[in-house]
Image (tube, rainbow, N blue to C red):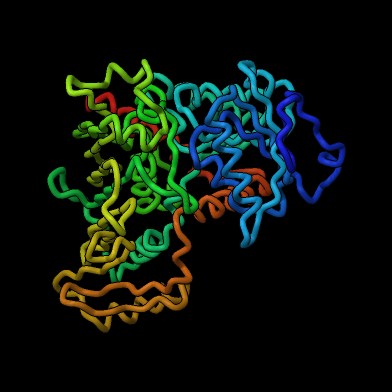
Amino acid sequence: MTLGSELNAESRDIAIPASLYSDTSKPWRLITLDPGHFHAALIQKSMYPEVDNNVYVYAPGGNDVKLHLNRINGYNNRAAGPTSWKEHVYEGEDFFNRMLSEKQGNIVMLAGNNKKKTEYILNSIKAGFHVYADKPMVINAASLPLLEEAFKVAEKKKLLLYDIMTERYEITTMIQKELSLSTQIFGKLLKGSSDHPAITKESVHHFYKEVSGAPLQRPAWFYDVEQEGEGIVDVTTHLVDLVQWGAFPDQVLRKKDIVINKARRWNTAVSMPEFTASTAAAGYPDYLKKYVDANGVLQVSSNGEINYTLKGVHAKVSVIWNYKAEPGGGDTHFSIMRGSFSDLVIRQGREQKFQPKLYIEKKSGLNTATVEHAFKQVEKKYPGITLLENDKGWEVIIPDTYREGHEAHFARVTEKYLGFLKAGKLPAWEVPNMITKYYTTTQALLKSK
């Protein structure tokens, strides 16, 4: 069926406007492949001058694509800054082959069921599409060679394969990285130890949450680790990425730089009423019943922790999934980078009113005059930030204008990717570091088992 200003359930054919290929001011055309995760819609929460507003959706049909189209329709009809996307939809079991043969766009965007995602990535690249994929691009070690092959084919065909690392655009994380480059404030990154890592990152997420101002309806398969991926290979992708990006900026990292010391995984219990509230499903589908315990409670292997070294630096990343946040709360992030002069700490708990805040925690020998002098260089890059001294050191006061929120970060990543497409290449370190990142998560999953 097609979707423009209205739904037409009669037709399954996609009619592409003749003007689409002639508008050189909009060289990029999106194809959304089997959207099952709300991240697919968040890419389109904003418009982009160089992207055509016709988007081509290929999916097997069902509730996932309906929810996706409802979200896009909501953005198109919102009162403030409405978007103007025109969704052209094909539904059918042959959706993937149909997409490959029709070539209605030149960027395949993937955010959904992860079971076949790596296979979709490789075959889309082979067919000549650029690929812009939500994390994780791979959920097990057996599929990693497919991703590595995809990068090789992409290089040969001059195509760009890129994953959506939104957390690089969180302002406290950006300033933490900037401060870590200050030898006067931070000193040098410590090596740490397994028990006292130099870098620790912890992310807490929730199955029941709001997105774009409305309760999120998750697909039932989101609770199946064979389709979504275990927690240790899913959200931890962001955390491993931030470790690499923050500790070794713009440096090429390889699999040989990684040593997995310890890894563990554990379950989150989700009751039937909770499952129904988050999915609108009346009961557990058959593929989830093997995870249901004797009390009828679903046990989801959504939590994971990796203790590893990267080029000799000890790091620990943890992801925790709870069912629902406490009132006033939401997903939270904790991060610490330990330096010889200070520790740089991001906290987002009740004390911070669940807003991420960045602290400089001083060590002996670091004085106020040195910090204030060196901080002026950081302030030049982020005008308006200031320091507030406290008993442990300083809090970095960040104006609200920098705090655009997680959903807006999808536009920032997309703008970055479009810039890479215009340049015709990614930075030299991005591809090897993506491979190293997914090697870390998938090897950790093996270790945890």
In the rendered view, does 192 fall on the left or right side of 138?
left
Residue, x 63% and y 48% (percent of image)? 418
Coordinates of residue 28 in the picture (x, y in percent):
71, 43
In the rendered view, does 340 fall on the left or right side of 374?
left
Q: Is residue 25 above or below residue 108?
A: below
Coordinates of residue 244 in the picture (x, y in percent):
37, 47
Q: Nearer the viewer, residue 210 or 282?
A: 282
The image quarter containing residue 89 is top right
Residue, x 56% and y 53% (percent of image)? 411
Q: Nearer the viewer, residue 102 or 38?
A: 38
Residue, x 51% and y 32% (percent of image)? 36
Coordinates of residue 175 in the picture (x, y in percent):
39, 65
Q: Is residue 99 above or below residue 369?
A: above
Q: Is residue 113 above or below residue 248?
A: above
In the rendered image, the quadrant that contains the N terminus is top right
Residue, x 26% and y 34% (percent of image)? 259
Q: Is residue 4 above or below residue 325?
A: above
Looking at the image, which residue sits at the far bottom? Answer: 369
Can residue 180 be spotted in the picture?
no
The image quarter containing residue 294 is top left
In the rendered image, the quadrant that contains the C terminus is top left
Q: Nearer the viewer, residue 269 or 383?
A: 269
Can residue 10 be spotted in the picture?
yes
The image quarter containing residue 225 is top left
The total of numbered circles placed on residues is: 0
Coordinates of residue 363 in the picture (x, y in percent):
16, 69
